[in-house]
Amino acid sequence: MANKSLQTQKNETMIKVRSLQEAKERIHSEIQNGKNYRDIAKMKFDIDGKARSFNISQISHIKSEFEPKNTEIHTNEDKADAFRLFRKGYNPADVLIETKYSFEFVKQAWREYNELRDKISVNNSFIRNLASELRPISNCKTFDDIEIAVSEAVDGYKEYEKFVYPCCECGKPVFFGKRSLEVAQKHLSKNWGHADCIDRAKRQRNRYR
């Protein structure tokens, strides 16, 4: 009788399943029903004649296997939208709340935004004229003075970069440089001036006609 009772108890506590996947599905079902991990860890499975149980770590991993994967896909437009908000002064937390984008996406977008914002692009004309552009450094006495001189040279170059005009031959953009400014000054001084001065000159010319 004792052996029969023991066999009955064994049959009651052992859960017979056909495969490991079926055992995982049973565990996931128990998790969904609110059963705690410690009680699930006490469950015994008969998988193809072999006894098997799962510890708490394995149960947690099984739970993650059945959870939906993050398939959120962000486009370039989403990143541009995040950059626009950063430029307006929004911090990453504000952007997360405003757009409902994922945390990882906003964090990566913030990192890339700051990386791009800190970069200054210069073209070959600036490099070629670097010696003359940085000539004021020779008068600097401290590192702070050097930093100011370099910043002023770059800022001055960036002002040139705002003005772009098409090439008279190929039509491709030409970036304004120091040489372009000198030529433009000579041209403008011959044809342009204060409106009052030009009007006065016209009246004088008309008077002597």
Image (cartoon, grey):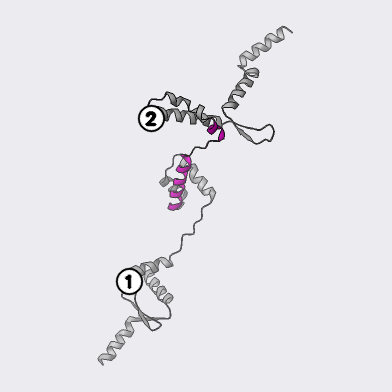
Q: What's the CA distance linking mark 1 and mark 2?
A: 63 Å
Count of numbered circles on the image: 2
- Assign the C terminus to one quadrant of the image: top right
Q: Nearer the viewer, residue 49 or 71?
A: 49
Q: Which residue is mark 2?
A: 143
Give x and y (percent) for residue 194.
60, 16
* Amino acid type assigned to the residue bearing label 2 in the image: Phe
Q: Residue at x 49, y 44 (%)?
A: 83
The residue most toward the bottom is: 1
Question: Toward which corner of the image does residue 4 lie, by quadrant?
Answer: bottom left
Q: Residue at x 43, y 53 (%)?
A: 104
- Assign the N terminus to one quadrant of the image: bottom left
Pointer 1 with pointer 2, Cβ within 8 A = no
Determine which of the numbered discs, if any, sits on residue 105 in the image.
none
Left or right: 121 in relation to 185: left
Q: Nearer the viewer, residue 40 or 34?
A: 40
Q: Residues within 10 Å of mark 2 (few under 14, many from 20)?
A: few
Left or right: 140 in relation to 200: left
The residue most toward the left is: 2
Describe the element under mark 1 as helix, strand or loop: loop
Give x and y (percent) for residue 11.
33, 85
Q: Residue at x 41, y 82 (%)?
A: 48
Instruction: Assess whether residue 118 is covered by the magenta stretch.
Output: yes
* Stretch of the chain drawn in magenta: 103-128
Instruction: Assess whether residue 63 is covered by the magenta stretch.
Output: no
Give x and y (percent) for residue 55.
32, 71
Determine which of the numbered discs, if any, sits on residue 55 in the image.
1
User: In this view of the protein, can residue 29 be seen by the observer?
Assistant: yes
